[in-house]
Amino acid sequence: MKLDQVGSFLRPKILKEARENFALGKIDEEQLRSIEDSCIRDLLEECDKAGIYYLSDGELRRSWWHLDFYWGFGGIKKIKKEKGYIFKGIETRAEGIEIESKIECNNHPFLKDFERLMQIAKGLKIDTNRLKLTIPSPSMLLYMLFIRGGKNTEFNYYGKDFTKLKNDILNAYENFYKEFAALGGVYLQLDDTSFGSLCDYEFCALNEINADDICEEYVDFLNESLKTMPKNIMSAIHICRGNYRSRYVASGGYMKVAKKLFGELRVDKFFLEFDDERAGDFEPLKYINDQIAVLGILTSKTNESPSVEELKARVKIAAQFLSPKQIEISTQCGFSSTEEGNEIFTHSQWEKIKLLKQVLSELENEGFFS
């Protein structure tokens, strides 16, 4: 079994300082990029040494896990909002998106970032087939526009022509997939908080949405997008409940969306959160067909961690609903979905990775995956 990871890692102090200096005009873009490259090189080495098989740039070049990607599309611009996104006990920075013209993908900056990642990996003699890129899912953009962004989010270019909006989103993602594959990319992870929010009854009531209808619409929309993904790309989706400075948005088990989401979505891997009681039980796993379920059994939000035996017990309970051969493990989310990062120590981040590696090794030695 290969140890995977959700994607984001805490930003090093030197990188945070470089961003501040860039914003103040004290360093130029190339100097910032050079510091980013150095931090990513260190991260790749550390992850490789820790036993993580699939590697990413840790999202170190980003401010947000999702908005930076959307800002890279033609037709979508960055805006300052009156209010940030509301999490449990905290409000985020007030930034968002506005559609000002046709959504399209031409020379997306994430592709240049991935090229640099590949060059860094080659310099470290790391197989580039181990690299993955994390991006927000296509359906996440619909969620941002019509639900999470508020009813009055601006998308005046499309008016009420939702069909054209959806088609342009699909075309933009298709172009991104193809350009990613042309670079030699083989693993794309789609990150998504919409389905996690649909599991929360309070969230659905507050936003006056029918979870069943939205789930069906989003799964079908995602499948349309996945049809256009080159066959050599391994696809994954991370079903998240929100992660900002260790706070969350939604609670509730996956059963509310499981039959449609797990039973019909055509991805190769599901990254799922199972770190505490807020995540519900493992029974929804019974709807997964032949895909891999990466069980997020360890929180990335706090410094504390359960024992190896407790984590192994969680995995064994999950195996009551899914073949052990379909199980992998990870933390429940990234460590730094935004540049602020979760409120944990850097050493805790690596202790958690080490703990997961130990859990994996002991389960393998017990013949659990055989």
Image (tube, helix red, strand yellow):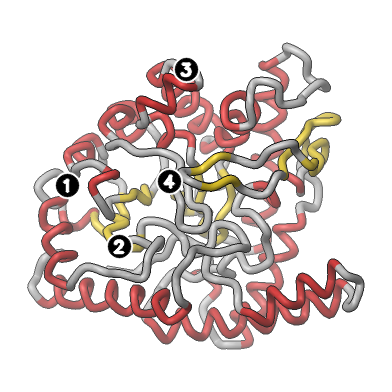
| Kind of residue sitting beneath label 3 | Ile
Note whether 226 is above or below 135 in the view shown.
above
What residue is pinned by disc 3?
A: 209
Query: Which label's residue is closer to the chain start, 4 or 1?
Result: 4
Circles 2 and 1 in contact, beta carbons < 8 Å: no
| Circle 1 crowding by C-alpha within 10 Å: few under 14, some 14–19, many from 20 | many
Residue 113 shows which numbered tag?
Answer: none
What residue is pinned by disc 1?
A: 322
Residue occupying image coordinates x 44% and y 60%: 6
Image quadrant where one finds the C terminus? bottom left
Q: Of 369 and 160, which appears nearest the observer?
A: 160
Query: Which label's residue is closer to the chain start, 4 or 3?
Result: 3
Query: Which label's residue is closer to the chain start, 3 or 1?
Result: 3
What residue is pinned by disc 4?
A: 240
Location of residue 105 in the rendering, given as x and y in whole percent from the top left corner: 76, 43
What residue is pinned by disc 2?
A: 298
Residue occupying image coordinates x 49% and y 27%: 218
Note whether 81 is above or below 208 in the view shown.
below
Location of residue 275 in the rendering, given as x and y in whole percent from the top left corner: 28, 55
Residue 216, visible in the rendered structure: yes
How far, Cα to Cα, is label 2 from label 3?
31 Å
Q: The residue tagged with tag 3: helix, strand or loop? A: loop
| Kind of residue sitting beneath label 2 | Leu
Quadrant of the rendered image containing residue 22:
bottom right
